[in-house]
Image (cartoon, rainbow, N blue to C red):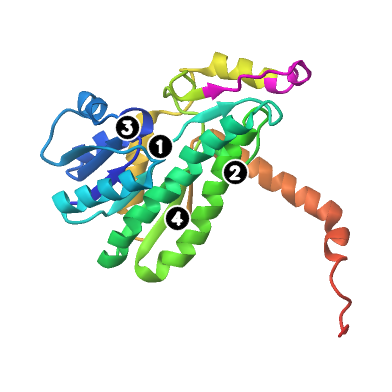
Amino acid sequence: MRVWFITGASRGFGALIAAEALAQGDAVVATARDPNAVTARLGTHERLLATRLDVTSETEAHEAAGQAVKKFGRIDVLVNNAGYGLLGAIEEASAKEVERLYATNVFGLLGVTRAVLPHMRRQGSGHIMNVSSVGGYAGFPGWGVYGSTKFAVEGISEALAAEVAPLGIHVTVVEPGFFRTDFLDDNSLVRTALEIGDYHATVGKTRGHAADVNHAQPGDPSKLAKAFMQLAAAKTPPVRLPLGSDTVARIESKHAFVEKELAAWRDVATSTDFAKGTA
């Protein structure tokens, strides 16, 4: 039996992963700002601990991790899922809107990770799964600031994977594409208060697409939850796991673009080294 610690577990991916883990016979520590929302969604279960956690409070993160270990004795899988989106142009995003987003999506993830890692290090095992996005691998107009938080998660995850591998701990950054959840609803997505007309052709198009595609996304959330179970069971899990054909296509497209651009600018890129033989 694995013990899962999942942030943002009252709805969306977090609730689905928690429900699937329980169905698999695992134990789940499901955290949310309102633990009553967790039990309302998942019910009560001897293998379920619903506990309060606002990820922007590292004190609460340590308390929740302590409760998890007290009840189940260990934490095998950490799913850093809590987060929300911000839709708007880079220039439209205020300092306050950006700071609030980073407080949850980046600093919150770091705080929870710092709270859980001492327990995993003591065990000599564990698997940290950081939820990123297709927007964490390639930028999109209108999603720049949100994507930047996920780019940060990608970099943190890659470095952390190398740091903790000798300790028996795995790290995977998961990159979902567009899945049919409530992510594009107002309770998960914040729109910048400012809208600038000059961005109508770019960011305006993104805003329209977000409204049109809401609840018509190609990804099946129940299949995503099952993919997390496969990931947890893997003996050699990947550092990066894209989920959704749209993410795969976007990664392949970006790779092709980067390779083409690098070929065109290779001479300039390599011209800045000292000449061979230079002291």
**Sooner in the amino-acid sequence: mark 3 or mark 2:** 3
Q: Amino acid at mark 4?
A: Pro
Q: Secondary structure at mark 4?
A: loop
The quarter of the picture where the C terminus appears is bottom right
* Residue 163 rendering spot, x and y as whole percentages: 46, 66
Say above or below: 135 vs 186: below
Instruction: Write the residue at 57% across / 19% down.
Output: 210
Return the mark for residue 238.
4
Which element type, helix, strand or loop, lies under badge 2? Answer: loop
Left/right placement of residue 102 relative to residue 111 reads right
* Mark 3 residue element: loop
Residue 252 placement (x, y as % from top left)? 63, 43
Q: Is residue 193 magenta?
A: yes
Q: What's the amino acid at mark 1? A: Ala
Residue 40 quadrant? top left
Q: Circle 1 sits in a helix, a strand or a loop, which is it?
A: loop
- Which residue was labeled with disc 1? 82
Q: Which amino acid is tagged 2?
A: Tyr
Residue at x-position 84% and y-position 71% = 273
- Residue 193 placement, left or right of 6: right
Of the two numbered discs 1 and 2 in the rendering, the one whose residue sits closer to the viewer: 1
Task: Provide the residue designation for mark 2.
Answer: 137
Q: Amino acid at mark 3?
A: Arg
Q: CA distance from mark 1 to mark 4?
A: 21 Å
Q: Which residues are magenta?
A: 190-203
The residue labelled by disc 3 is 33
